[in-house]
Amino acid sequence: MDGNGRWAKARGLPRIEGHRRGVENVLAILDAGAEMGIEVLTLYAFSVENWQRPAEEVAALMGLLEHFIGLHTDRLVQRETRLRVAGDISALPAGARGAVEAAMERTSHFRKRTLCLALNYGSRTEIVEAAKAFARDVAAGRATPESLDWAALSQRLYTAGLPDPDLIIRTSGETRLSNFLLLQAAYAEMYFTPVPWPEFGPERLKEAVDSFRRRERRFGKTGEQVRCGR
Ligand code: FPP
């Protein structure tokens, strides 16, 4: 969800105004995604690196998160959407953490759609934590080094149980992954757009999804094999 700050700056507004607009857009994209049949939508809301931003911006982001969850959990319930988190939310301020935990609890039984918020998320931290968890299991005799495969590792990632992303969209002209779902993105299609997040509305999402649908995904096979269903 990149470009909130630049969107605001270009209009002579404070950065937080850009984040406010960004949050309004989350709702529009959530609804549009549900209508397009997107089953899992993951939003990179706050990275482990984002703690380095000015304290007032961090506080404002946490406030927006808490406000958004408090205001829109009913909508998640109406949409039969489960809220999940990728990241370590124990470091979040109590208000934001409590709101997220309550919404996760209230929506945990839904299976149709998932909104996953990457909060205090960093892919390298996630991989290190998964490696530690596996090492602990080996030390306790619950696993052997030889039993480590992708399935065993991925079930120790924050995204355990979620499918790998098919499409990763990055707004605002950046063309890098910035520590987002590095392992899960192995076969993801990438979509980069110069449009800043506050302006990346439902029409833009549709363009991204249409672009995704036109692509041939080969997963290492030849185009012919894929077309013949082999
Ligand atoms: C990127 O814009 C945006 C963020 C780092 C924060 C996005 C998170 C929120 C708006 C908090 C609430 C989240 C939800 C899901 C309700 P940027 O500030 O990096 O923009 P810039 O690159 O133009 O400076």
Image (cartoon, rainbow, N blue to C red):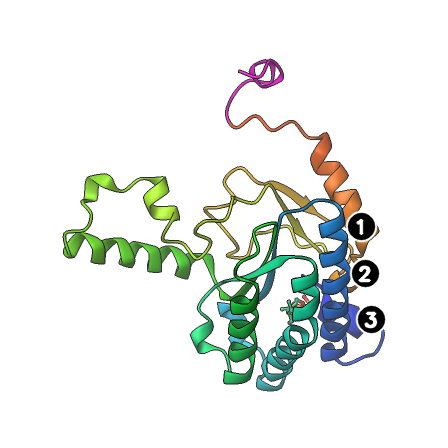
**Residue beneath label 2, please?**
199
Estimate how packed mark 3 is, as few (under 14), some (14 to 19) or many (20 or more) residues with alpha carbons within 10 Å: few
* Residue 157 occupies quadrant: bottom left
**Residue beneath label 1, please?**
204
Q: Is mark 2 within 8 Å of ligand 1?
A: no
- Per the image, label 3 sits on a secondary structure element best described as helix
Q: Is residue 195 above or below residue 95?
A: above
Distance from the alpha carbon under mark 2 to that under mark 1: 8 Å
User: Quadrant location of the N terminus?
Assistant: bottom right
Distance from the alpha carbon under mark 3 to that under mark 1: 20 Å
**133 relative to 26 in the view: left or right:** left
Indicate which disc residue 10 carries.
3
Indicate which disc residue 223 carries.
none
Estimate how packed mark 1 is, as few (under 14), some (14 to 19) or many (20 or more) residues with alpha carbons within 10 Å: some
Residue 2 in view (yes/no) = no
Q: Which residues are magenta?
A: 220-230
In the rendering, at what x and y percent does residue 14 appear?
A: 76, 81
Asked if the residues shown at circle 2 and circle 1 are in contact, with their CB atoms under 8 angstroms apart, the answer is yes
Q: Is residue 159 above or below residue 2?
A: above
Estimate how packed mark 2 is, as few (under 14), some (14 to 19) or many (20 or more) residues with alpha carbons within 10 Å: some
In the rendering, at what x and y percent does residue 5 appear?
A: 72, 71
First in sequence, mark 2 or 1: give its number. Answer: 2
**145 relative to 66 in the view: left or right:** left
| Tag nearer the camera, 3 or 1 | 1
**73 relative to 145 in the view: left or right:** right
In the rendering, at what x and y percent does residue 12 appear?
A: 83, 78
Q: Is mark 3 within 8 Å of ligand 1?
A: no
Amino acid residing under circle 1: Arg
Amino acid residing under circle 3: Ala
